[in-house]
Amino acid sequence: MNTLHEQLLDQLVSYVQTLPANAKLLSERQLANKYQVSRNTVRLALLDLESTGLVRRVQGEGTFVNRINLQSDLGSSYKFGQQMRLLGKTPSTKIISFEEKDVNAYFAKNLNLEIGEKMLKLGACV
Protein backbone atom coordinates (compact mmCIF):
# COMPACT_ATOMS: atom_id res chain seq x y z
CA MET A 1 0.00 0.00 0.00
CA ASN A 2 1.25 3.48 -0.83
CA THR A 3 2.12 5.86 1.98
CA LEU A 4 0.11 9.05 2.45
CA HIS A 5 3.06 10.97 0.96
CA GLU A 6 3.10 8.76 -2.17
CA GLN A 7 -0.68 9.04 -2.56
CA LEU A 8 -0.47 12.83 -2.34
CA LEU A 9 2.42 12.86 -4.80
CA ASP A 10 0.32 10.92 -7.33
CA GLN A 11 -2.62 13.29 -6.82
CA LEU A 12 -0.41 16.36 -7.20
CA VAL A 13 1.16 15.01 -10.40
CA SER A 14 -2.35 14.52 -11.82
CA TYR A 15 -3.33 18.03 -10.68
CA VAL A 16 -0.22 19.65 -12.18
CA GLN A 17 -0.74 17.86 -15.48
CA THR A 18 -4.16 19.51 -15.84
CA LEU A 19 -2.63 22.98 -15.63
CA PRO A 20 -1.04 24.96 -18.46
CA ALA A 21 2.70 25.71 -18.47
CA ASN A 22 3.72 28.39 -15.94
CA ALA A 23 0.36 28.24 -14.12
CA LYS A 24 0.47 28.95 -10.40
CA LEU A 25 -0.54 26.08 -8.13
CA LEU A 26 -2.79 26.48 -5.12
CA SER A 27 -0.97 27.54 -1.93
CA GLU A 28 0.36 24.91 0.49
CA ARG A 29 -2.54 25.67 2.84
CA GLN A 30 -5.11 25.31 0.04
CA LEU A 31 -3.55 22.03 -1.14
CA ALA A 32 -3.52 20.70 2.44
CA ASN A 33 -7.23 21.51 2.76
CA LYS A 34 -8.09 20.10 -0.67
CA TYR A 35 -6.31 16.77 -0.08
CA GLN A 36 -6.98 16.60 3.69
CA VAL A 37 -3.30 16.29 4.69
CA SER A 38 -0.90 18.38 6.74
CA ARG A 39 0.97 21.32 5.24
CA ASN A 40 4.21 19.49 6.03
CA THR A 41 3.09 16.55 3.87
CA VAL A 42 2.23 18.99 1.07
CA ARG A 43 5.59 20.75 1.46
CA LEU A 44 7.50 17.44 1.19
CA ALA A 45 5.50 16.37 -1.86
CA LEU A 46 6.14 19.74 -3.55
CA LEU A 47 9.86 19.34 -2.86
CA ASP A 48 9.72 15.96 -4.61
CA LEU A 49 7.90 17.50 -7.58
CA GLU A 50 10.48 20.27 -7.69
CA SER A 51 13.31 17.72 -7.71
CA THR A 52 11.69 16.02 -10.73
CA GLY A 53 11.47 19.36 -12.53
CA LEU A 54 7.68 19.22 -12.79
CA VAL A 55 7.25 22.40 -10.74
CA ARG A 56 9.40 25.33 -9.69
CA ARG A 57 9.07 27.17 -6.39
CA VAL A 58 9.63 30.90 -6.13
CA GLN A 59 10.04 32.14 -2.58
CA GLY A 60 7.31 34.60 -1.65
CA GLU A 61 5.40 34.00 -4.91
CA GLY A 62 4.34 30.36 -4.97
CA THR A 63 4.77 27.15 -6.92
CA PHE A 64 4.44 27.09 -10.70
CA VAL A 65 4.09 24.44 -13.40
CA ASN A 66 7.51 24.01 -14.93
CA ARG A 67 6.47 22.38 -18.18
CA ILE A 68 6.86 23.45 -21.75
CA ASN A 69 4.37 22.83 -24.51
CA LEU A 70 6.29 20.31 -26.59
CA GLN A 71 4.16 20.99 -29.66
CA SER A 72 5.16 24.65 -29.87
CA ASP A 73 8.20 25.23 -27.67
CA LEU A 74 10.34 22.37 -28.97
CA GLY A 75 10.11 23.67 -32.54
CA SER A 76 11.05 27.16 -31.44
CA SER A 77 14.12 25.77 -29.64
CA TYR A 78 15.46 24.42 -32.92
CA LYS A 79 14.69 27.71 -34.64
CA PHE A 80 16.62 29.55 -31.94
CA GLY A 81 19.84 27.75 -32.93
CA GLN A 82 19.27 28.50 -36.60
CA GLN A 83 18.57 32.16 -35.82
CA MET A 84 21.77 32.48 -33.77
CA ARG A 85 23.84 30.98 -36.60
CA LEU A 86 22.30 33.44 -39.05
CA LEU A 87 23.46 36.23 -36.72
CA GLY A 88 26.99 34.83 -36.77
CA LYS A 89 26.77 33.46 -33.23
CA THR A 90 27.47 29.96 -32.01
CA PRO A 91 24.67 28.51 -29.87
CA SER A 92 25.86 26.35 -26.99
CA THR A 93 24.67 24.61 -23.87
CA LYS A 94 26.39 25.11 -20.52
CA ILE A 95 26.07 22.54 -17.74
CA ILE A 96 25.32 24.47 -14.55
CA SER A 97 24.74 21.57 -12.16
CA PHE A 98 25.36 17.86 -12.08
CA GLU A 99 24.54 15.73 -9.07
CA GLU A 100 23.82 12.16 -8.08
CA LYS A 101 20.44 11.69 -6.40
CA ASP A 102 18.50 8.76 -4.95
CA VAL A 103 15.47 7.64 -6.95
CA ASN A 104 12.28 8.74 -5.16
CA ALA A 105 8.78 7.21 -5.38
CA TYR A 106 7.80 9.30 -8.42
CA PHE A 107 10.76 8.15 -10.56
CA ALA A 108 10.56 4.58 -9.27
CA LYS A 109 6.96 4.34 -10.42
CA ASN A 110 7.27 6.21 -13.73
CA LEU A 111 10.67 5.00 -14.91
CA ASN A 112 10.48 1.45 -13.60
CA LEU A 113 13.34 1.98 -11.13
CA GLU A 114 13.82 0.96 -7.52
CA ILE A 115 13.56 3.51 -4.69
CA GLY A 116 17.08 4.32 -3.52
CA GLU A 117 18.79 3.53 -6.83
CA LYS A 118 21.11 6.28 -8.03
CA MET A 119 20.21 8.68 -10.84
CA LEU A 120 21.86 11.77 -12.26
CA LYS A 121 20.27 15.22 -12.19
CA LEU A 122 21.59 17.57 -14.83
CA GLY A 123 20.92 21.31 -15.00
CA ALA A 124 21.83 23.18 -18.16
CA CYS A 125 21.25 26.49 -19.87
CA VAL A 126 21.35 27.43 -23.52
Image (spheres, rainbow, N blue to C red):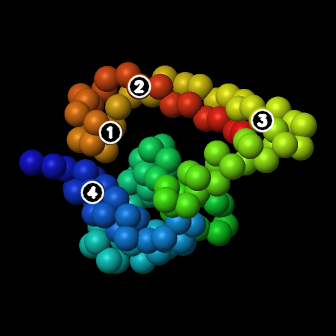
Q: Residue 30 appears in which quarter of the rendering?
A: bottom left
Which secondary structure, mark 1?
Answer: helix
In the depicted view, which residue is nearer to us: 17 or 68? 68
What SS does tag 4 mark?
Answer: helix
Tell which circle, 3 or 2, labels the residue nearer the N-terminal end: 3
Residue 74 location (% of width, % of height): 56, 51
Is residue 21 visible in the rendered structure shown here?
A: yes
Classify mark 1: residues with Cα within 10 Å, few (<14), some (14-19) or many (20+).
some
**Residue flagged by tag 2: what amino acid is it?**
Met
- As rendered, which of 92 and 45 lies closer to the eye? 92
* Residue at (49, 59) in percent of width and height: 71
- Amino acid of disc 3: Pro
Q: Earlier in the sequence, mark 1 or mark 4?
A: 4
What numbered label is drawn on residue 107?
1
In the image, 14 versus 94, the foreground residue is 94
Quick one: label 4, few (<14), some, or many (20+) residues within 10 Å? some
What distance separates the C-alpha of mark 1 from that of mark 3? 31 Å
Dot 1 amino acid type: Phe
Cβ–Cβ below 8 Å for labels 2 and 1? yes
Whole-angstrom CA distance, mark 2 to mark 1, is 9 Å
Q: Nearer the viewer, residue 84 or 67?
A: 84
User: Vertically, is 46 above or below 25?
Assistant: above
Q: Position of residue 92 (x, y in %)?
A: 75, 32
**Disc 3 secondary structure class:** loop
Label 4 sits on residue:
10
Instruction: Give, as a three-letter code, the residue at label 4.
Output: Asp
